[in-house]
Image: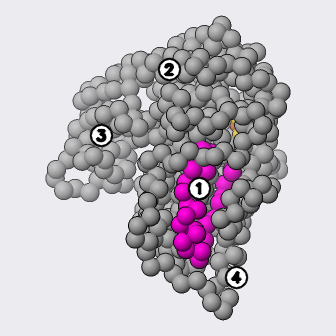
Amino acid sequence: MKYHLWTIGCQMNSADSRHVGAALEALGGVPTPDPHQADVIVLNTCVVRQSAEDRAAGFLWSLKPLKERRPGLVIALMGCMVGVKGNGRLREVFPHVDVFLPPGDARGLVEWLTERAGQAHPPAPCQGEPHPPAPVESEPHPPSPSPLRGEGERSPSPLAERGLGGEVLAERGLGGEVLAERGLGGEVLALVSEPHPPAPSPLRGEGGRSPSLPTRKPGVSAPVAALLGCNHVCSYCIIPSRRGPERSRPLDEILTEVRSLAAAGVREVVLLGQIVDRYGYDLGATAPRLPDLLAATAAVEGIVRVRFLTSHPTYFDDRLVEAVATLPAVCEHIEVPIQAGDDEVLARMRRGYRVDDYRRLIERLRARLPGCAIATDVIVGFPGETERQFQATLDLLAELRMDVCHVAMYSPRPGTLAARTMPDDVPVEEKKRRLDAVNALQEQIAAEINARLLGQRVEILVEGRQKGRWKGRTRTNKLVFFDDDSGTDWRGRLVDVRITWTGPWSLIGDVVAA
Ligand code: SF4
């Protein structure tokens, strides 16, 4: 059985996909990058932003002719498009989908495949599809007919693929090429379709998650879900309704997964949660919290770096600051969204803090963690956002000078409070202007911050090669490229480089020690 796993959205989805791949490989599955060669295709979806939903729907529609030619092909739809409660309407809209799965839970697919395998005449494995046009992930998919949109929602824009102005490029390569797109909340809208390390263990734990025991070489850095769902009700956000309430994974389950990843060569773990700082809150007063999880993860043999995201200004307490300050493996890299620089807008967003609270947090972080990098998120064009309120956001960004600002244009998500009660009254061209203004300001700030690293020696963890160069990241998550023709395999190694060139999105250096 060959399977193709297509993933879009946040790092949580990437972590979920690893578990799906593991579950399929436990059934004897082998990953393939070509959907036309696959017997099973799983789409792991995101609906946080309209463009991500359009992209998933477009890919799904492009699979319909393939399914008609090969009825034995299994198509599974997973993730936030389905949600924890399922989505009955999807069955009508996409009748060519066989299985619908909630976020991170492959059990339904495993049961379905197991049951089918027990039938008298299981469909023959795919012999290869010679000619159908391949839906290449890096290419835009056909525009969705948009069956999922509610009344009054905007029709898909032909520019939706990159946002009407390319909502944010948090990371760019040397030539300015996009390495990752980000959406609301800083989630990466990058596509992943890689082989995932299989788990021979049966599915267990939250959402059918099993601590994976990889046999294939995974990446140098791996996302690991710590906390699932969210109890907050930010008025624009669809995540609580799609991923359910907050649930922390047991510490030992997370550590088993981290150990298995370390055994497979992973050197860095990124602990994930919608509000990762709230890890353990739902497990009782004496349960381990995020600082405990960070310490335990950092102690796993083979793990040299630990990151965590995403934080919330309300929950970044002193104990967490101390954990970052004192645990050598925990990186000085904080992702804590502000979303808007105006108290009235923040109140309508239901974020639960004021601008001054955020200011004080940034002061506290910089006082205890000198040299730390802080990334934030901003939404522009939220309902009712006036020019003065937008200017307050720009002024705050200029004042706080963050290392990264992920900016997205507001788009109403069906079922959210904002979509129900707040008219989407900022014209799209105005949203685009505001987005461009934030990007221009942030580019200048990031260039100035990074320029301070010129001539400095920094430690990077090498992730691999890109366009003929080695690339890695500093502890502060800055992307660094270096050249080396010696034939050394630097992947997974901690290397000291001296920075010789800086730009807003990346740096270049020379190796000085490994
Ligand atoms: S904190 Fe707010 S924006 Fe983040 S996932 Fe929860 S509801 Fe969504």
Q: What residue sits right under mark 1 in the picture?
A: 61
- Quadrant position of residue 427: top right
Q: In the image, what residue type sits under mark 4?
A: Glu
Q: Residue at 59%, 17% (x, y): give it.
A: 430
Question: Is residue 456 shown in magenta?
Answer: no
Q: In the image, what residue type sits under mark 1?
A: Trp
Badge 3: how crowded within 10 Å, few (<14), some, or many (20+)?
A: many
Q: Is residue 274 above or below residue 224?
A: above
Residue 20 percent location from the top left of the image = 60, 65
Q: What residue sits right under mark 3 in the picture?
A: 481
Q: What residue sits right under mark 4 in the picture?
A: 115
Pick whichever of labels 3 and 1 is earlier in the sequence: 1
Where in the image, quadrant-wise, is ligand 1 located? top right
Quote the CA–CA distance across marks 4 and 1: 26 Å
Q: Which residues are magenta?
A: 52-81
Pick whichever of labels 4 and 2 is earlier in the sequence: 4
